[in-house]
Amino acid sequence: MVTNAYNVTGSFGEFTTAIQSRWNEGYDLVDVEYGDGTWFGVFQNKPGGNGYDISGSLGEFTTAIQNRWSQGYHLVDVEYGNGTWFGVFQQDSGANAFNPASSLNELTTAIQSRWNEGYDLVDVEYGDGTWFGVFQNKPGGNGYDISGSLGEFTTDIKTMWDRGSDLVGVEYGNGNWFGVFQDTPSTNAYSSARNINDFTTAIKNRWDEGYELVDVGYGDGLWFGVFLGSTSSNLQSSAVNLVTTQLELESLKSIVLASQDVLKV
């Protein structure tokens, strides 16, 4: 059963109102993406308290994160959009760390250091010239992939699937697609679209197949959704076939197209 929801809004005020409405329905905010003038929120019915913080500068944002830690909340997702740093927090979600970096090389070095400390990478964001990594002490293997084109990225996703790792997060920044991978017992799929209406249709189609939306990225004029499903081998086979079809369609398209503090407990 899919216990998943999303909201698409054209203004930040509408977006925060939508978050409150979803909280009232029992959903927690798990992912935020800003692209093409649109705020996109992903929601799930997760246990524990949920909150968010917004900041106009990176310094204010990192201070807000530390304040949340003192309240028992941990950072699970970061977004930068329209001059705003946006952090999503979950209560009792395990040990937490973060690293801002001024270059991709600096970020990958920080990832290796965090792995050595026992942390897994759970989210990456690029904004205002900064790469930002979020880490937690999660079970299972962890990895990432950096690709300079969508075609290369989707090929790498299949390679990671063959190694037993699922795509759990996606980001586009400074000409690169960045994928976060985790060893999970779930099946995995993705969908992409060039406009928001086609993208929301793709989400509903994935819901019909038994998948839940877990992460959204926007870059190079493309909306990209990451989905996790059941452990059924039939569903995994279906996902591979469907994603292959999506990749073929996207390849054809590419050719043609050449500090506010809010808390809910």
Image (spheres, rainbow, N blue to C red):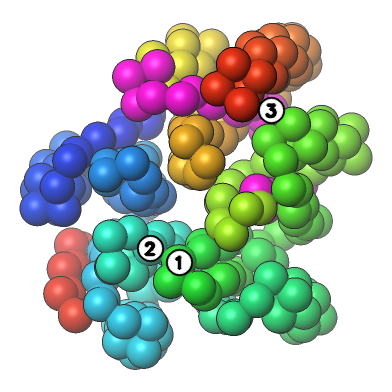
In the structure shown, which secondary structural element does the residue marked by tag 3 occupy?
A: loop
Residue 104, image quadrant? bottom right
Q: Is residue 196 magenta?
A: yes
Discs 2/3, front = 2
**Which residue matches tag 1?**
127
Decide: few, some or many residues near mark 1? Use Cα within 10 Å; few <14, some 14-19, many ≥20. some
Q: Which mark is residue 80?
A: 2
**Which residue matches tag 3?**
187
x and y percentages locating residue 161 in the rendered image: 82, 34
Give yes or no for contact between labels 2 and 1 (Cβ–Cβ under 8 Å). yes
Q: CA distance from mark 2 to mark 3?
A: 29 Å
Q: State which region is magenta.
A: 177-198
Work out whether 184 lies above or below 94.
above
- Viewed as shown, does residue 184 lie left or right of 127? right
Q: Could you tell me the amino acid type at mark 1?
A: Gly
Q: Is residue 190 magenta?
A: yes
x and y percentages locating residue 188 in the rendered image: 67, 29
Q: Could you tell me the amino acid type at mark 2?
A: Tyr
Discs 3/1, front = 1
